[in-house]
């Protein structure tokens, strides 16, 4: 990661490059990809948005797929399904107009993830099956997005498609053997095989080799899940799940941290420990859970969709939403969405002025209640 950042720094050190708007667009998007690979979803999204704006201003459409891919993926992991759908559709538009900077399998990968979030595992598995049946597509995905393969193997196993899961693992092993000096591919092969065979030791080795922090958190989560499946829902399983939940939360991956939190709740893990990993509320008076619900609903999700994203029941989401309406002083989801946009609560810390915390009281005087 440090070497990748240094390359970009060396490129823009030349004033002729730094002052060229085309190179500015390219280097901003490349830096966004590096930041995303490092696990900082919020900053990666901000850089990708800036890079896309620059690219559009100078007509550099060949680079827009990279920005769209980063924004679709960061939005999905942060639980912003409507935003992720928007950028996934942009990727489809890129394909239609021949902006072929990315391999088709990379775009397919985010489309499958969005389908799983929006329509469920069965629909996603159908698309994933088409992808995995193509050796060329799977091979290119393995080299471009190694973390995708264990996720796809996990999906196929959940839908009883062990044949395709085994094919993905076999291809991983083959590519890892051909590229012994690429640690991330080796980690992916171990991770995928550990899932297929239920081998915790393979997963532990994968966590040691994974460079991608999201893939590493996924492997740690898988260790916890395998321990539970083996009837060992004790301290080790909880420790692994809590580590995965904390890692996801630190990256800003609300959807993943919520999934793990749901599993911890099912095994009666410490609820206070779980609560530590909700994203911190930026709205005075709203708890972290209420903030997360408000954020999803303001992005256009129904109660059911928000419940799916947060791995809560619909009744729990509805309960939190009623409290949010009462505290903020709004009467509808539309009013909440408008107020949310006025607050800029979903734009990231860098875009929020230091005095923003007082804006809620200013917009709705005397309507913010304690609690």
Image (tube, helix red, strand yellow):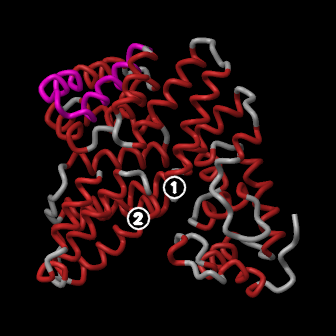
- Which disc number belongs to residue 183? none
Closer to the camera, 115 or 286?
A: 286
Along the line of sight, the residue nearer the viewer: 371 or 1: 1
Is residue 213 highlighted in magenta?
A: no
| Residue 139 sits above or below residue 117 on the image | above
Q: Is residue 47 left or right of residue 279?
A: left
Q: Do the residues labelled 2 and 1 touch (CB within 8 Å)?
A: yes
Disc number placed over residue 45 in the picture, else none: 2
How packed mark 2 is, by other alpha carbons closer than 10 Å (few <14, some 14-19, many 20 or more), is: many
Q: In this view, does 367 lie to the left or right of 315?
A: right
Q: Is 285 located above or below residue 267 in the figure?
A: below
- The dot on residue 78 is 1
Q: Hey, which quadrant is residue 129 in on the image?
A: top left
Picture quarter containing residue 32?
A: bottom left
Between 110 and 118, the one lying in front of the other is 110
Percent position of residue 159, x then y: 44, 25
Left of 5 or right of it: where is 245?
A: right
- Position of residue 31 relative to residue 191, above or below, is below
Q: Residue at x 26, y 59 (%)?
A: 5
Q: Is residue 188 magenta?
A: yes
Task: Point out the stretch of residues depicted in magenta.
Answer: 171-198
How far is disc 2 from disc 1 in space, using C-alphas? 10 Å
Please identify the quadrant where the C terminus is shown: bottom right
State the image quarter where residue 299 is shown.
Answer: bottom right
Residue at 30 percent of width and 18 percent of height: 166
x, y percent for residue 282: 67, 68
| Element under disc 2 | helix
The percent position of residue 203, horizontal first and vertical second, equals 41, 22
């Amino acid at each position: 990661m440090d070497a990748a950042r240094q390359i970009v720094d060396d490129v823009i050190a030349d004033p002729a490059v730094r002052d060229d708007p085309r190179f500015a667009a390219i280097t901003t998007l490349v830096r966004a990809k590096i930041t995303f690979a490092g696990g900082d979803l919020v900053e990666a999204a901000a850089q990708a948005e800036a890079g896309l704006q620059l690219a559009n201003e100078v007509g550099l459409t060949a680079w827009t797929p990279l920005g769209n891919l980063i924004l679709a993926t960061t939005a999905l992991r942060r639980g912003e399904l409507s935003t992720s759908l928007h950028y996934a559709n942009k990727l489809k538009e890129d394909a239609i107009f021949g902006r072929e900077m990315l391999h088709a399998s990379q775009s397919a990968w985010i489309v499958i993830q969005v389908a799983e979030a929006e329509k469920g595992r069965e629909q996603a598995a159908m698309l994933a099956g088409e992808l995995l049946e193509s050796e060329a597509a799977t091979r290119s995905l393995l080299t471009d997005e190694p973390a995708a393969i264990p996720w796809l193997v996990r999906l196929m196993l959940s839908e009883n498609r062990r044949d395709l899961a085994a094919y993905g693992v076999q291809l991983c092993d083959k590519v890892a053997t051909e590229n012994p000096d690429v640690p991330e591919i080796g980690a992916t092969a171990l991770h995928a095989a550990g899932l297929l065979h239920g081998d915790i030791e393979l997963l532990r080795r994968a966590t040691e080799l994974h460079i991608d922090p999201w893939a590493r958190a996924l492997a740690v989560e898988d260790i916890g899940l395998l321990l539970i499946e083996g009837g060992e829902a004790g301290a080790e399983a909880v420790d692994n799940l809590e580590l995965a939940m904390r890692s996801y939360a630190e990256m800003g991956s609300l959807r993943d941290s919520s999934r793990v939190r749901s599993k911890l709740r099912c095994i009666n893990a410490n609820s206070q420990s779980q609560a530590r990993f909700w994203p911190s509320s930026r709205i005075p008076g709203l708890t972290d859970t209420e903030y997360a619900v408000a954020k999803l609903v303001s992005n256009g999700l129904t109660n059911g969709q928000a419940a799916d994203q947060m791995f809560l029941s619909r009744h729990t989401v509805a309960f939190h939403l009623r409290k949010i309406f009462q505290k903020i002083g709004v009467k509808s989801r539309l009013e909440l969405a408008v107020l949310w946009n006025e607050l800029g609560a979903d734009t990231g810390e860098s875009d929020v002025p230091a005095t923003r915390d007082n804006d809620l009281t200013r917009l709705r005087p005397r309507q913010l209640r304690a609690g």
